[in-house]
Image (cartoon, coloured by chain):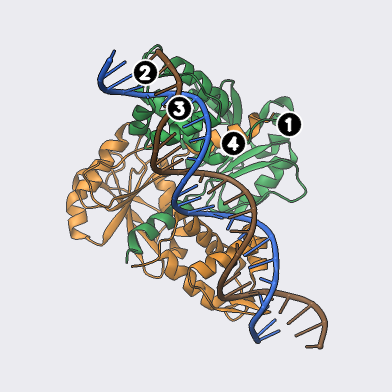
Chain colours: A green, B orange, C blue, D brown
Amino acid sequence: MKKKISLRVIRRISFYYEALLKLNLPENTYISSRKLEEVTGVSCNQVRQDFFYLGISIGKQKKGYQVKKLFRELKKILSIDHSSKVIIIGAGRIGQALSNYKLFKDRNIMVTALFDIKKELVGTEIGKPGQKKPVLHVDGLEAYLSENPDIKIALLTVPEEAAQETLDKLISHGIMGVVNFAPKILKVPKETRDIQLINDCIGTSLYKIVYLLYSKK
Amino acid sequence: MKKKISLRVIRRISFYYEALLKLNLPENTYISSRKLEEVTGVSCNQVRQDFFYLGISIGKQKKGYQVKKLFRELKKILSIDHSSKVIIIGAGRIGQALSNYKLFKDRNIMVTALFDIKKELVGTEIGKPGQKKPVLHVDGLEAYLSENPDIKIALLTVPEEAAQETLDKLISHGIMGVVNFAPKILKVPKETRDIQLINDCIGTSLYKIVYLLYSKK
DNA sequence: TAGATTGTTAATCGATTAACAATC
DNA sequence: TAGATTGTTAATCGATTAACAATC
């Protein structure tokens, strides 16, 4: 029965959250919509409109929004007020790079394991000491997921050729959300239930930048 | 004096183009807006609306759009009917993965070189035999760009900490378009002219997938 | 107090969807 | 011919911007 929030709003909310993280202000200080405009590029009107729409009414006239409270509200909306476990499929260059991103921590996201089919990779561990993650064989995926039923998200970094097939397999094993990094737009099979798929292919950005730069006039 | 085309439209145009590439139909066959809906997920009404808006009036009733002509039109709009050279800044895992993407070819994009500061990397070559690209030191960037004034685009894959500083440097050396892959939202300095910056940080997708999956109810 | 900033409404803008005459 | 599909217009929908009273 919740109000529908578009992904555009979610994107902006994530900008506000990132900005707060970066500014690293004391928890009991205040930040105004004007300041948020300055650091995120989102207009102060839009900021207030978003907050109004989402029911964030913690502002104080003349001061703004208390950092501590704002953090709490934003986290709640983004559903990062609790921890989420994810796996990475494909332990190649992209998968390895992802698994080391420290940004996961601030988002309460934990990479629990990587999966691959290459002999050289399976059995190794990726990451700095203290945060090493195992690389397992894709054949063990089904077993792994049934042992860890709280893992609902997979990041897909396999080669283009294997991407659709791997996606289908993930879905059949119970994964509910996938971010696809392979340079190819994937689709979820029609019959499947509420699977969330985000195609984060780099292709799109390349088209955009080329268009922006070369189509002038 | 050209009509303004939003990045949303560009994104869809790239979907149509990708779909055509993938279908690999004979040049003299026809594809309908319904078929395009089927393969891209964009509604046939939207497809025709896009084509109308962009002045693509090559359709034939009862048949659709000739593949050959459609390719030509889409390429023209995307400005990929001519070749673009790009450099990659940061020859780490992400940079190396990017430099090997074959998708560049269909987009008429050529990676000419990678840049890094690490001793182990500078001087090496990345890529398969026949398409090897040199890794150069960032200190040589200015000289390289003045020798290659047709390079206007850089893909930024340096660590988060170095990202903003590197972006500023690129701009000062004449780069006009940057796609940022570092997990941090960058900004172009205010004074600078028409610099095009696309932040393609993976962060956003993660927020979206977590939201989509866990905010239910 | 005067100035700054919120919450909220209304106006504007842009994008998508629906509909259908034309016609191959 | 009948059916399918385009090009185009109008209607709808949603998102952004602007404005301002309330008030700390």
- Amino acid type assigned to the residue bearing label 2 in the image: Lys
Whole-number angstrom distance, CA of label 2 to CA of label 4 = 27 Å
Marks 1 and 4: which is nearer the front?
A: 4
- Position of A73 with respect to B94 (left or right) is right
- Give the SS element for disc 4: loop
Q: Disc 2, disc 4: CB below 8 Å? A: no
- Amino acid type assigned to the residue bearing label 1 in the image: Ala
- Residue A76 seen anywhere in this rendered image of the structure: yes
- Give the SS element for disc 1: helix
Q: Earlier in the sequence, mark 1 or mark 4?
A: 4
* Mark 4 crowdedness (10 Å alpha carbons): few <14, some 14-19, many ≥20: some
Q: Is residue B181 above or below residue A110?
A: below
Judging from the image, mark 4 belongs to the subunit labelled: A
Q: Earlier in the sequence, mark 3 or mark 2?
A: 3
**Quarter of the image with the C terminus of chain A in it:** bottom left
Residue under label 4: A5
Q: Which mark is residue A17?
A: 3
Residue at figure coordinates x 37%, y 57% from the top left? A212
Percent across and percent down for residue B197 are 35, 47
Question: Is B104 or D11 nearer to us in this picture?
Answer: D11
